[in-house]
Protein backbone atom coordinates (compact mmCIF):
# COMPACT_ATOMS: atom_id res chain seq x y z
CA UNK A 1 0.00 0.00 0.00
CA UNK A 2 0.86 3.70 -0.05
CA UNK A 3 1.87 3.51 3.62
CA UNK A 4 4.76 1.25 2.70
CA UNK A 5 5.85 3.65 0.03
CA UNK A 6 5.89 6.64 2.39
CA UNK A 7 8.11 4.79 4.80
CA UNK A 8 10.96 5.30 2.46
CA UNK A 9 11.53 8.99 3.04
CA UNK A 10 13.89 9.61 0.22
CA UNK A 11 11.47 8.25 -2.31
CA UNK A 12 8.57 10.45 -1.25
CA UNK A 13 9.22 13.41 -3.59
CA UNK A 14 9.69 11.05 -6.50
CA UNK A 15 6.54 9.12 -5.78
CA UNK A 16 4.60 12.32 -5.09
CA UNK A 17 5.71 13.68 -8.41
CA UNK A 18 4.75 10.49 -10.11
CA UNK A 19 1.29 10.54 -8.55
CA UNK A 20 0.80 14.17 -9.61
CA UNK A 21 1.85 13.34 -13.13
CA UNK A 22 -0.49 10.41 -13.32
CA UNK A 23 -3.37 12.46 -11.90
CA UNK A 24 -2.68 15.25 -14.38
CA UNK A 25 -2.62 12.78 -17.22
CA UNK A 26 -5.86 11.12 -16.11
CA UNK A 27 -7.48 14.54 -15.75
CA UNK A 28 -6.35 15.54 -19.22
CA UNK A 29 -7.79 12.33 -20.64
CA UNK A 30 -11.06 12.82 -18.78
CA UNK A 31 -11.23 16.45 -19.94
CA UNK A 32 -10.53 15.46 -23.49
CA UNK A 33 -13.20 12.74 -23.39
CA UNK A 34 -15.64 15.13 -21.75
CA UNK A 35 -15.05 17.68 -24.51
CA UNK A 36 -15.46 14.98 -27.13
CA UNK A 37 -18.73 13.82 -25.61
CA UNK A 38 -20.00 17.38 -25.28
CA UNK A 39 -18.96 18.12 -28.84
CA UNK A 40 -20.74 15.03 -30.08
CA UNK A 41 -23.87 15.94 -28.12
CA UNK A 42 -23.80 19.47 -29.49
CA UNK A 43 -23.37 18.26 -33.03
CA UNK A 44 -26.20 15.82 -32.62
CA UNK A 45 -28.39 18.58 -31.23
CA UNK A 46 -27.48 20.99 -34.01
CA UNK A 47 -28.13 18.34 -36.59
CA UNK A 48 -31.55 17.61 -35.11
CA UNK A 49 -32.45 21.27 -34.97
CA UNK A 50 -31.28 22.28 -38.39
CA UNK A 51 -33.24 25.20 -39.74
CA UNK A 52 -33.12 25.61 -43.47
CA UNK A 53 -33.72 29.33 -43.77
CA UNK A 54 -34.31 28.97 -47.50
CA UNK A 55 -37.50 26.89 -46.93
CA UNK A 56 -40.84 28.74 -47.02
CA UNK A 57 -42.68 29.07 -43.70
CA UNK A 58 -45.49 26.70 -42.78
CA UNK A 59 -48.94 27.74 -43.98
CA UNK A 60 -51.56 28.34 -41.36
CA UNK A 61 -54.65 26.75 -42.87
CA UNK A 62 -57.87 28.47 -41.94
CA UNK A 63 -61.10 27.07 -43.40
CA UNK A 64 -61.51 25.41 -46.76
CA UNK A 65 -62.06 26.38 -50.34
CA UNK A 66 -65.68 27.00 -51.29
CA UNK A 67 -67.23 24.13 -53.31
CA UNK A 68 -68.05 26.54 -56.13
CA UNK A 69 -64.45 27.72 -56.32
CA UNK A 70 -63.12 24.16 -56.33
CA UNK A 71 -65.11 23.39 -59.45
CA UNK A 72 -64.50 26.78 -61.03
CA UNK A 73 -60.73 26.47 -60.61
CA UNK A 74 -60.79 23.02 -62.16
CA UNK A 75 -62.85 24.34 -65.05
CA UNK A 76 -60.56 27.36 -65.58
CA UNK A 77 -57.50 25.10 -65.56
CA UNK A 78 -58.90 22.98 -68.38
CA UNK A 79 -59.70 26.02 -70.53
CA UNK A 80 -56.37 27.74 -69.82
CA UNK A 81 -54.75 24.55 -71.03
CA UNK A 82 -56.63 24.91 -74.31
CA UNK A 83 -55.41 28.45 -74.93
CA UNK A 84 -58.37 30.39 -73.53
CA UNK A 85 -57.93 33.43 -71.32
CA UNK A 86 -60.08 34.52 -68.41
CA UNK A 87 -62.23 37.62 -68.91
CA UNK A 88 -63.95 39.61 -66.20
CA UNK A 89 -66.63 42.25 -66.55
CA UNK A 90 -69.19 44.35 -64.69
CA UNK A 91 -72.14 42.90 -62.78
CA UNK A 92 -74.00 46.18 -63.28
CA UNK A 93 -74.63 46.38 -67.02
CA UNK A 94 -76.15 48.62 -69.59
CA UNK A 95 -79.38 47.19 -71.02
CA UNK A 96 -77.55 47.32 -74.34
CA UNK A 97 -74.94 44.72 -73.33
CA UNK A 98 -77.23 42.44 -71.33
CA UNK A 99 -80.04 42.32 -73.93
CA UNK A 100 -79.98 44.58 -76.98
CA UNK A 101 -76.57 43.64 -78.43
CA UNK A 102 -77.40 39.96 -77.82
CA UNK A 103 -80.33 40.23 -80.20
CA UNK A 104 -82.89 40.54 -77.38
CA UNK A 105 -84.81 43.76 -78.18
CA UNK A 106 -87.11 45.47 -75.69
CA UNK A 107 -90.25 43.48 -76.57
CA UNK A 108 -88.54 40.07 -76.88
CA UNK A 109 -90.16 37.25 -74.84
CA UNK A 110 -86.72 36.13 -73.63
CA UNK A 111 -86.79 39.19 -71.37
CA UNK A 112 -89.66 37.65 -69.40
CA UNK A 113 -87.64 34.65 -68.27
CA UNK A 114 -84.72 36.88 -67.37
CA UNK A 115 -86.48 39.60 -65.41
CA UNK A 116 -83.93 41.39 -63.31
CA UNK A 117 -83.25 44.25 -60.97
CA UNK A 118 -83.34 47.58 -62.78
CA UNK A 119 -81.14 50.36 -61.49
CA UNK A 120 -82.62 52.69 -64.07
CA UNK A 121 -84.35 52.12 -67.43
CA UNK A 122 -81.00 51.51 -69.02
CA UNK A 123 -78.94 50.01 -66.22
CA UNK A 124 -79.54 46.50 -64.89
CA UNK A 125 -77.87 43.83 -62.79
CA UNK A 126 -76.75 41.39 -65.48
CA UNK A 127 -78.96 38.31 -65.87
CA UNK A 128 -76.33 36.27 -67.68
CA UNK A 129 -72.61 36.29 -68.39
CA UNK A 130 -73.34 36.54 -72.13
CA UNK A 131 -72.72 40.33 -72.21
CA UNK A 132 -69.07 39.37 -71.78
CA UNK A 133 -69.22 38.12 -75.38
CA UNK A 134 -69.95 41.67 -76.55
CA UNK A 135 -67.26 43.26 -74.33
CA UNK A 136 -64.70 40.77 -75.64
CA UNK A 137 -65.63 41.34 -79.27
CA UNK A 138 -65.39 45.12 -78.79
CA UNK A 139 -62.06 45.16 -76.98
CA UNK A 140 -60.03 42.13 -78.04
CA UNK A 141 -58.04 41.30 -81.14
CA UNK A 142 -59.26 38.41 -83.29
CA UNK A 143 -59.07 35.47 -82.93
CA UNK A 144 -60.74 35.43 -79.49
CA UNK A 145 -60.88 32.61 -76.95
CA UNK A 146 -62.27 33.59 -73.57
CA UNK A 147 -63.79 32.07 -70.46
CA UNK A 148 -65.85 34.52 -68.39
CA UNK A 149 -67.11 33.33 -65.00
CA UNK A 150 -69.11 35.57 -62.71
CA UNK A 151 -72.18 36.43 -60.66
CA UNK A 152 -75.54 36.99 -62.32
CA UNK A 153 -78.91 38.18 -60.99
CA UNK A 154 -82.54 37.37 -61.66
CA UNK A 155 -85.82 38.30 -60.07
CA UNK A 156 -86.41 34.75 -58.79
CA UNK A 157 -87.85 33.69 -55.46
CA UNK A 158 -85.52 31.52 -53.41
CA UNK A 159 -86.37 27.81 -53.48
CA UNK A 160 -84.41 24.54 -53.71
CA UNK A 161 -83.20 25.27 -57.23
CA UNK A 162 -83.57 29.05 -57.61
CA UNK A 163 -81.84 32.07 -56.16
CA UNK A 164 -81.83 35.76 -57.12
CA UNK A 165 -78.04 35.56 -57.36
CA UNK A 166 -76.12 32.69 -58.86
CA UNK A 167 -73.02 32.06 -60.98
CA UNK A 168 -72.49 31.39 -64.64
CA UNK A 169 -69.52 30.63 -66.83
CA UNK A 170 -69.46 31.94 -70.37
CA UNK A 171 -67.16 30.52 -73.00
CA UNK A 172 -66.54 31.85 -76.49
CA UNK A 173 -64.24 31.16 -79.44
CA UNK A 174 -64.13 33.26 -82.63
CA UNK A 175 -61.81 32.54 -85.53
CA UNK A 176 -61.86 31.84 -89.24
CA UNK A 177 -63.57 28.56 -90.09
CA UNK A 178 -65.01 27.73 -86.66
CA UNK A 179 -67.91 25.27 -86.83
CA UNK A 180 -70.36 23.44 -84.59
CA UNK A 181 -67.92 20.50 -84.64
CA UNK A 182 -65.39 22.67 -82.74
CA UNK A 183 -68.04 23.45 -80.15
CA UNK A 184 -68.91 19.79 -79.63
CA UNK A 185 -65.29 18.69 -79.68
CA UNK A 186 -64.25 21.28 -77.11
CA UNK A 187 -67.15 20.66 -74.74
CA UNK A 188 -66.80 16.88 -74.98
CA UNK A 189 -63.12 17.15 -74.12
CA UNK A 190 -63.87 19.44 -71.15
CA UNK A 191 -66.51 17.04 -69.85
CA UNK A 192 -64.14 14.09 -70.20
CA UNK A 193 -61.46 15.89 -68.19
CA UNK A 194 -63.96 16.98 -65.59
CA UNK A 195 -66.04 13.82 -65.13
CA UNK A 196 -63.84 11.08 -66.53
CA UNK A 197 -63.03 9.39 -69.81
CA UNK A 198 -66.33 7.59 -70.29
CA UNK A 199 -68.78 10.41 -69.66
CA UNK A 200 -71.59 10.44 -72.23
CA UNK A 201 -73.05 13.71 -73.55
CA UNK A 202 -75.91 14.59 -75.86
CA UNK A 203 -76.72 17.81 -77.72
CA UNK A 204 -80.38 18.80 -78.16
CA UNK A 205 -81.60 21.55 -80.51
CA UNK A 206 -82.78 24.66 -78.64
CA UNK A 207 -83.31 28.37 -79.18
CA UNK A 208 -81.32 31.34 -77.95
CA UNK A 209 -81.67 34.76 -79.60
CA UNK A 210 -77.91 35.26 -79.85
CA UNK A 211 -76.93 31.91 -81.36
CA UNK A 212 -77.98 30.17 -84.55
CA UNK A 213 -78.17 27.23 -84.52
CA UNK A 214 -78.54 26.79 -80.75
CA UNK A 215 -78.44 23.70 -78.59
CA UNK A 216 -78.41 22.45 -75.03
CA UNK A 217 -75.91 19.91 -73.78
CA UNK A 218 -76.88 17.16 -71.31
CA UNK A 219 -74.58 14.74 -69.59
CA UNK A 220 -75.70 11.28 -68.69
CA UNK A 221 -76.64 11.07 -65.01
CA UNK A 222 -73.58 10.18 -62.90
CA UNK A 223 -75.76 8.34 -60.38
CA UNK A 224 -77.82 5.97 -62.50
CA UNK A 225 -75.93 6.05 -65.84
CA UNK A 226 -79.07 6.82 -67.79
CA UNK A 227 -81.53 4.48 -66.09
CA UNK A 228 -83.39 7.32 -64.35
CA UNK A 229 -83.22 8.15 -60.63
CA UNK A 230 -84.16 10.93 -58.18
CA UNK A 231 -80.98 12.90 -58.95
CA UNK A 232 -81.91 13.29 -62.64
CA UNK A 233 -85.66 13.32 -61.87
CA UNK A 234 -86.04 10.05 -63.75
CA UNK A 235 -84.65 11.52 -67.00
CA UNK A 236 -81.33 9.71 -67.05
CA UNK A 237 -79.76 12.99 -68.26
CA UNK A 238 -78.79 16.24 -66.57
CA UNK A 239 -78.94 19.49 -68.55
CA UNK A 240 -75.73 21.44 -68.02
CA UNK A 241 -75.45 24.25 -70.54
CA UNK A 242 -76.81 26.27 -73.45
CA UNK A 243 -74.66 26.88 -76.50
CA UNK A 244 -74.59 27.56 -80.21
CA UNK A 245 -72.94 29.30 -83.12
CA UNK A 246 -72.81 33.06 -82.55
CA UNK A 247 -75.59 34.78 -84.51
CA UNK A 248 -74.23 36.76 -87.52
CA UNK A 249 -76.28 39.76 -86.31
CA UNK A 250 -74.33 39.72 -83.03
CA UNK A 251 -70.97 39.48 -84.80
CA UNK A 252 -71.85 42.26 -87.26
CA UNK A 253 -73.15 44.43 -84.40
CA UNK A 254 -69.62 44.32 -82.95
CA UNK A 255 -68.02 45.13 -86.30
CA UNK A 256 -66.88 41.56 -87.08
CA UNK A 257 -67.32 40.39 -90.67
CA UNK A 258 -69.55 37.33 -90.35
CA UNK A 259 -68.62 36.11 -93.84
CA UNK A 260 -64.98 35.77 -92.75
CA UNK A 261 -65.25 34.94 -89.05
CA UNK A 262 -67.49 32.59 -87.12
CA UNK A 263 -67.59 31.45 -83.54
CA UNK A 264 -69.26 29.35 -80.89
CA UNK A 265 -70.37 30.28 -77.39
CA UNK A 266 -71.77 28.53 -74.37
CA UNK A 267 -73.17 29.56 -71.00
CA UNK A 268 -73.59 27.32 -67.98
CA UNK A 269 -74.65 27.54 -64.37
CA UNK A 270 -71.83 26.96 -61.91
CA UNK A 271 -74.05 25.79 -59.03
CA UNK A 272 -75.51 22.93 -61.08
CA UNK A 273 -72.05 21.94 -62.23
CA UNK A 274 -70.76 21.92 -58.66
CA UNK A 275 -73.65 19.71 -57.56
CA UNK A 276 -72.99 17.23 -60.34
CA UNK A 277 -69.19 17.31 -59.94
CA UNK A 278 -69.20 16.87 -56.21
CA UNK A 279 -72.07 14.40 -56.15
CA UNK A 280 -74.16 16.37 -53.68
CA UNK A 281 -77.71 15.01 -53.36
CA UNK A 282 -80.79 16.56 -51.95
CA UNK A 283 -81.23 15.28 -48.44
CA UNK A 284 -84.96 14.96 -48.38
CA UNK A 285 -86.75 13.52 -51.33
CA UNK A 286 -90.43 14.32 -51.73
CA UNK A 287 -91.00 11.62 -54.35
CA UNK A 288 -89.63 8.91 -52.10
CA UNK A 289 -91.91 9.90 -49.26
CA UNK A 290 -94.94 9.91 -51.57
CA UNK A 291 -94.11 6.48 -52.97
CA UNK A 292 -93.70 4.94 -49.53
CA UNK A 293 -96.95 6.52 -48.38
CA UNK A 294 -98.71 5.07 -51.44
CA UNK A 295 -97.29 1.66 -50.68
CA UNK A 296 -98.50 1.86 -47.08
CA UNK A 297 -101.94 2.93 -48.40
CA UNK A 298 -102.01 -0.02 -50.74
CA UNK A 299 -101.34 -2.45 -47.88
CA UNK A 300 -103.45 -0.83 -45.15
CA UNK A 301 -106.27 0.55 -47.29
CA UNK A 302 -105.93 3.90 -45.50
CA UNK A 303 -105.69 6.95 -47.72
CA UNK A 304 -104.14 10.28 -47.02
CA UNK A 305 -106.68 13.00 -46.25
CA UNK A 306 -109.35 10.72 -44.76
CA UNK A 307 -108.81 11.82 -41.20
CA UNK A 308 -106.19 13.54 -39.18
CA UNK A 309 -105.42 10.47 -37.06
CA UNK A 310 -104.99 8.25 -40.11
CA UNK A 311 -102.76 10.86 -41.80
CA UNK A 312 -100.56 10.90 -38.71
CA UNK A 313 -100.27 7.11 -38.79
CA UNK A 314 -99.41 7.10 -42.50
CA UNK A 315 -96.77 9.74 -41.94
CA UNK A 316 -95.24 7.95 -38.96
CA UNK A 317 -95.06 4.60 -40.75
CA UNK A 318 -93.50 6.21 -43.83
CA UNK A 319 -90.97 8.23 -41.92
CA UNK A 320 -90.04 5.49 -39.43
CA UNK A 321 -89.60 2.77 -42.01
CA UNK A 322 -87.47 5.02 -44.13
CA UNK A 323 -85.23 5.87 -41.17
CA UNK A 324 -85.17 2.29 -39.90
CA UNK A 325 -84.03 0.91 -43.28
CA UNK A 326 -81.09 3.27 -43.34
CA UNK A 327 -80.15 2.45 -39.74
CA UNK A 328 -80.16 -1.29 -40.42
CA UNK A 329 -78.15 -0.64 -43.56
CA UNK A 330 -75.62 1.13 -41.31
CA UNK A 331 -75.29 -2.05 -39.27
CA UNK A 332 -77.62 -1.15 -36.38
CA UNK A 333 -79.85 -3.94 -35.04
CA UNK A 334 -82.88 -3.68 -32.76
CA UNK A 335 -81.71 -3.95 -29.14
CA UNK A 336 -82.32 -2.33 -25.80
CA UNK A 337 -79.53 0.20 -25.88
CA UNK A 338 -78.03 3.00 -27.92
CA UNK A 339 -79.06 3.32 -31.55
CA UNK A 340 -80.42 -0.21 -31.41
CA UNK A 341 -82.93 1.00 -28.85
CA UNK A 342 -83.93 3.92 -31.07
CA UNK A 343 -84.35 1.52 -33.96
CA UNK A 344 -86.52 -0.83 -31.89
CA UNK A 345 -88.77 2.09 -30.86
CA UNK A 346 -89.07 3.25 -34.49
CA UNK A 347 -90.13 -0.19 -35.63
CA UNK A 348 -92.54 -0.78 -32.77
CA UNK A 349 -94.15 2.59 -33.21
CA UNK A 350 -94.54 1.97 -36.93
CA UNK A 351 -96.07 -1.46 -36.24
CA UNK A 352 -98.44 0.00 -33.64
CA UNK A 353 -99.64 2.61 -36.16
CA UNK A 354 -100.18 -0.23 -38.63
CA UNK A 355 -102.48 -1.75 -36.01
CA UNK A 356 -104.28 1.58 -35.64
CA UNK A 357 -104.89 1.45 -39.39
CA UNK A 358 -106.35 -2.02 -38.97
CA UNK A 359 -103.53 -4.31 -40.13
CA UNK A 360 -102.85 -7.26 -37.87
CA UNK A 361 -100.26 -9.12 -39.93
CA UNK A 362 -96.60 -8.07 -40.17
CA UNK A 363 -96.45 -5.76 -43.18
CA UNK A 364 -93.65 -3.23 -42.63
CA UNK A 365 -91.08 -5.48 -44.25
CA UNK A 366 -93.02 -5.09 -47.52
CA UNK A 367 -92.76 -1.31 -47.37
CA UNK A 368 -88.99 -1.62 -47.17
CA UNK A 369 -88.86 -2.76 -50.78
CA UNK A 370 -90.27 0.62 -51.81
CA UNK A 371 -87.69 2.49 -49.75
CA UNK A 372 -84.92 0.48 -51.36
CA UNK A 373 -86.25 0.78 -54.88
CA UNK A 374 -86.55 4.55 -54.51
CA UNK A 375 -83.08 5.06 -53.08
CA UNK A 376 -80.87 2.37 -54.50
CA UNK A 377 -79.34 4.65 -57.15
CA UNK A 378 -78.10 7.04 -54.53
CA UNK A 379 -77.40 4.42 -51.89
CA UNK A 380 -76.39 1.17 -53.63
CA UNK A 381 -75.67 -0.38 -50.21
CA UNK A 382 -79.45 -0.48 -49.65
CA UNK A 383 -79.88 -2.83 -52.61
CA UNK A 384 -76.96 -4.97 -51.46
CA UNK A 385 -78.45 -5.45 -48.03
CA UNK A 386 -82.10 -5.62 -49.10
CA UNK A 387 -82.87 -9.14 -47.89
CA UNK A 388 -80.99 -8.52 -44.65
CA UNK A 389 -82.92 -5.31 -43.91
CA UNK A 390 -86.21 -7.01 -44.76
CA UNK A 391 -85.40 -9.96 -42.49
CA UNK A 392 -84.49 -7.75 -39.52
CA UNK A 393 -87.70 -5.76 -39.82
CA UNK A 394 -89.86 -8.84 -40.24
CA UNK A 395 -88.30 -10.52 -37.21
CA UNK A 396 -88.79 -7.45 -35.05
CA UNK A 397 -92.39 -7.13 -36.21
CA UNK A 398 -93.07 -10.77 -35.32
CA UNK A 399 -91.45 -10.39 -31.90
CA UNK A 400 -93.49 -7.30 -31.33
CA UNK A 401 -96.70 -9.05 -32.35
CA UNK A 402 -96.18 -11.37 -29.37
CA UNK A 403 -95.88 -8.49 -26.87
CA UNK A 404 -98.52 -6.37 -28.48
CA UNK A 405 -101.43 -8.40 -27.05
CA UNK A 406 -99.97 -7.95 -23.59
CA UNK A 407 -99.90 -4.24 -24.33
CA UNK A 408 -103.54 -4.23 -25.37
CA UNK A 409 -104.49 -5.91 -22.10
CA UNK A 410 -102.51 -3.42 -20.01
CA UNK A 411 -104.05 -0.59 -21.98
CA UNK A 412 -107.58 -1.94 -21.39
CA UNK A 413 -106.92 -2.40 -17.66
CA UNK A 414 -105.47 1.10 -17.24
CA UNK A 415 -108.36 2.56 -19.17
CA UNK A 416 -110.93 0.86 -16.92
CA UNK A 417 -109.01 2.05 -13.85
CA UNK A 418 -108.93 5.64 -15.06
CA UNK A 419 -112.58 5.66 -16.05
CA UNK A 420 -113.59 4.29 -12.67
CA UNK A 421 -111.76 7.19 -11.01
CA UNK A 422 -113.26 9.65 -13.47
CA UNK A 423 -109.78 10.66 -14.64
CA UNK A 424 -109.48 12.05 -18.13
CA UNK A 425 -105.77 11.48 -18.67
CA UNK A 426 -103.21 8.72 -18.18
CA UNK A 427 -100.41 9.53 -15.79
CA UNK A 428 -97.07 10.30 -17.40
CA UNK A 429 -95.66 7.04 -16.11
CA UNK A 430 -98.45 4.91 -17.55
CA UNK A 431 -98.41 6.79 -20.83
CA UNK A 432 -94.65 6.34 -21.11
CA UNK A 433 -94.83 2.64 -20.39
CA UNK A 434 -97.45 2.14 -23.06
CA UNK A 435 -95.45 4.20 -25.50
CA UNK A 436 -92.06 2.75 -24.70
CA UNK A 437 -92.87 -0.92 -24.48
CA UNK A 438 -95.91 -1.26 -26.64
CA UNK A 439 -95.51 1.54 -29.18
CA UNK A 440 -98.74 3.36 -28.29
CA UNK A 441 -98.95 6.96 -29.54
CA UNK A 442 -97.43 9.32 -27.02
CA UNK A 443 -100.44 11.63 -26.79
CA UNK A 444 -102.69 9.42 -24.68
CA UNK A 445 -104.92 12.29 -23.75
CA UNK A 446 -108.53 12.94 -22.93
CA UNK A 447 -109.68 11.81 -26.36
CA UNK A 448 -108.27 8.31 -25.97
CA UNK A 449 -109.77 7.89 -22.56
CA UNK A 450 -113.11 9.07 -23.87
CA UNK A 451 -113.03 6.86 -26.99
N1 LIG B 1 -77.07 33.12 -71.43
C1 LIG B 1 -77.90 31.96 -71.53
C2 LIG B 1 -78.77 31.83 -70.26
O1 LIG B 1 -78.49 32.46 -69.28
C3 LIG B 1 -77.07 30.72 -71.68
C4 LIG B 1 -76.38 30.66 -73.01
C5 LIG B 1 -76.97 30.01 -74.04
C6 LIG B 1 -75.15 31.27 -73.22
C7 LIG B 1 -76.38 29.91 -75.29
C8 LIG B 1 -74.53 31.18 -74.45
C9 LIG B 1 -75.16 30.50 -75.48
O2 LIG B 1 -73.34 31.72 -74.70
O3 LIG B 1 -74.54 30.41 -76.69
O4 LIG B 1 -79.74 31.12 -70.27
Image (tube, rainbow, N blue to C red):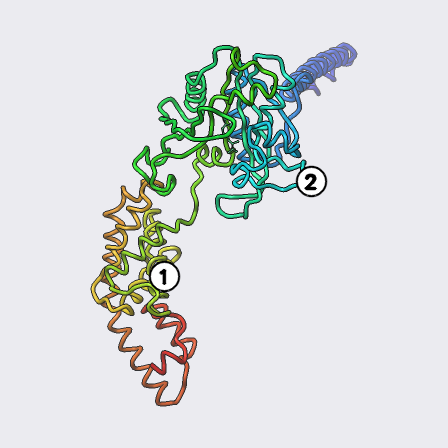
Camera-nearest label, 1 or 2:
2
Report which residue position mark 1 lands on. Answer: 315
Quadrant containing the C terminus in the rendered view: bottom left
In the image, residue 200 lies at what x, y percent? 35, 26
Q: Residue at x 31, y 53 (%)?
A: 291
Quadrant hosting residue 314: bottom left
Instruction: Name the foreground residue: 425 vs 61.
Output: 425
Q: Is residue 302 above or below residue 20?
A: below
Quadrant hosting residue 180: top left
In space, the residues marked 1 and 2 are separated at their CA atoms by 50 Å
In the image, residue 348 lies at what x, y percent? 31, 63
Quadrant hosting residue 149: top right
Q: Residue at x 50, y 31 (%)?
A: 268
Left or right: residue 422 versus residue 353 is right
Q: Helix, strand, or loop for circle 1?
A: helix
Q: Looking at the rendered structure, which numbered label has been put on residue 120?
A: 2
In the image, residue 128 lies at what x, y percent? 56, 33
Q: Is residue 363 above or below residue 432?
A: above
Is any atom of residue 37 visible in this view? no
Is any atom of residue 180 visible in this view? yes
- Which residue of the protein is positioned furthest toward the left in this rendering? 361
Q: Residue at x 38, y 89 (%)?
A: 421
Quadrant containing the N terminus in the rendered view: top right
Q: Are marks 1 and 2 in contact (CB under 8 Å)?
A: no
In the image, residue 274 lies at what x, y percent? 49, 34
Give the mark, 1 or 2, whose residue is nearer the N terminus: 2
Q: Looking at the rendered structure, which numbered label has been put on residue 73?
A: none
Amino acid sequence: GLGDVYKRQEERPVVGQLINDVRAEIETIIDKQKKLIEQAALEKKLEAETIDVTLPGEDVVIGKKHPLNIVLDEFKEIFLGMGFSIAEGPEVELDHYNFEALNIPKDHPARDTQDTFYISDNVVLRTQTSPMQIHAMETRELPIRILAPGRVYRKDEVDATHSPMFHQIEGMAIDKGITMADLKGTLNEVVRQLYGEHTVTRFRPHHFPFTEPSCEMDIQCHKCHGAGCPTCKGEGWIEVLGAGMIHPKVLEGCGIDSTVYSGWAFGMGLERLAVVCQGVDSLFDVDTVMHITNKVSEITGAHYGESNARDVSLRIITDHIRSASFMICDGVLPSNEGRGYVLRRLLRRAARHGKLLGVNEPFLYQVVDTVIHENECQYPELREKQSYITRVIRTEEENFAKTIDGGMKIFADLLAEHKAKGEMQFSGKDAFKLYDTYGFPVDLTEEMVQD
